Image (spheres, grey):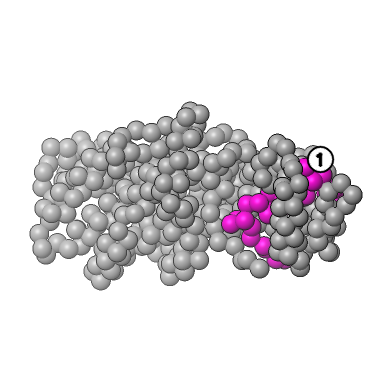
Amino acid sequence: MDSLITAAARALAAGDPLGALKRVALRNDAPGLALRGIAMAQLGDHARAKILLRSAARAFGPKEEVARARCVVAEAEIALVSRDLGWPAKALDAARAVLEEHGDRVNAAHARYLEVRRLLLIGRLDEAERALADLDPTPFPPASRAAHELVVAGIAMRRLRTKTARAALARAQLAARHAGIPALTSEVESAFLVLNTPAARLIAGGEERPLRLEEVEALLATKAFVVDACRYVVHGEGKVVSLAKRPVLFALARALGEAWPGDVPRDTLVARAFRLKLADESHRARLRVEVGRLRKVLRTLADVSATKRGFVLAPRRAHEVVVLARPVEEEHGAVLAFLADGESWSSSALALALGTSQRTVQRALDSLAASSKVQSFGRGRARRWMTPPVLGFTTTLLLPAPLLID
């Protein structure tokens, strides 16, 4: 490897893409193409970066399989950053195996981190934790250690383990300082911001106040009966009952939770559950059926009793009922939660992350675009959606994550 290639590689490792391009901008040999591709990726030109990396992979000879594997890993990172979540995971896994076989443990670990970050984005936390458990970051350089701790913190925040998250971010901050890469330091600071900004609203007794992630964690550890409008579940007595696929029942549970210890008139429940302004006898009959279903679902945690004018929630053991709501109520809040990271997303990637159909996501995006809450660029498969981050609150609780369902 010649001196210019070595100097460019060092510049990229230090987070200086312009310094790298000064040395290899006019080179079309395989190493030069690869370094140019990584530099363009660091500068944000992902489309050009992909072209250069693929050209580099083709230019490397059949005996240079390690170099080709590194190109695959770099392309996978670009796909992750550009939210191309449908990028073939098997290609990344094969590249990682080649790197491990040839003793390139640092780049092999980086490939593993990319896969874990992808699993984290689409809410497959159990798989992400299993993949991360096989990695020991101790012998890695500072940048890799910082990446490891950022992934640990990300999983911990999604699990609502804030002490674990803070400890991991403190280690990430120290490693990022040692690495001396401004972009990495900025990423750690952004992660700290998630812990220090409101993540939800607590509604109880007709009043509401913002909660940080740590306060949400503390609330769920109490004996309170919690109607969680961030994840559409009900918490109580150490159990979790999911109503994510039963929106009518959840609407009833939330209305009853907000009114507790008082009752809710029947017409109000009809309006909340069925989105109707006026209720007739058929709607009241349907309400009785849905209340019966809700009573059955919550039978181990609470009862739903009839009163003279409506219904009231009666927890079996809890002495307090609260509602945990999103910081900002929005019809398509889950879509906005992903877009709020400041990255550009395709509708297919959003559908994969949300576990829903692409058509459903497209309708949500069209609705948000009509109200100027999101914007798109590009056409066809290259079309991407984004929105500036909403300042003042974090969207961690809006992102999908598996819960223990009773």
- The residue under the point 23% across, 60% down is 69
Residue ranking furthest to the right: 308
Residue ranking furthest to the front: 281
Q: Where does the image place residue 93, in percent across and percent down from the top left?
A: 31, 65
Question: For mark 1, does the 10 Å Cα neighbourhood hold few (<14), some (14 to 19), or many (20 or more) residues?
Answer: few
The image quadrant that residue 40 belongs to is top left
**Range drawn in magenta:** 238-267
Image quadrant containing the C terminus: bottom right
Q: Is residue 397 magenta?
A: no
For this view, does 174 lie left or right of residue 268?
left
Q: Where does the image place residue 141, in percent across and percent down from the top left?
A: 38, 57
- The answer to whether one can see residue 287 in this image is no
- The residue under the point 67% across, 63% down is 240
Viewer-side residue, 369 vs 139: 369
The image quadrant that residue 296 belongs to is bottom right
Q: Is residue 266 magenta?
A: yes
Q: Where does the image place residue 346, in percent across and percent down from the top left?
A: 37, 44
The number of discs equals 1
**Residue for badge 1:** 206
- The residue under the point 71% across, 52% down is 286
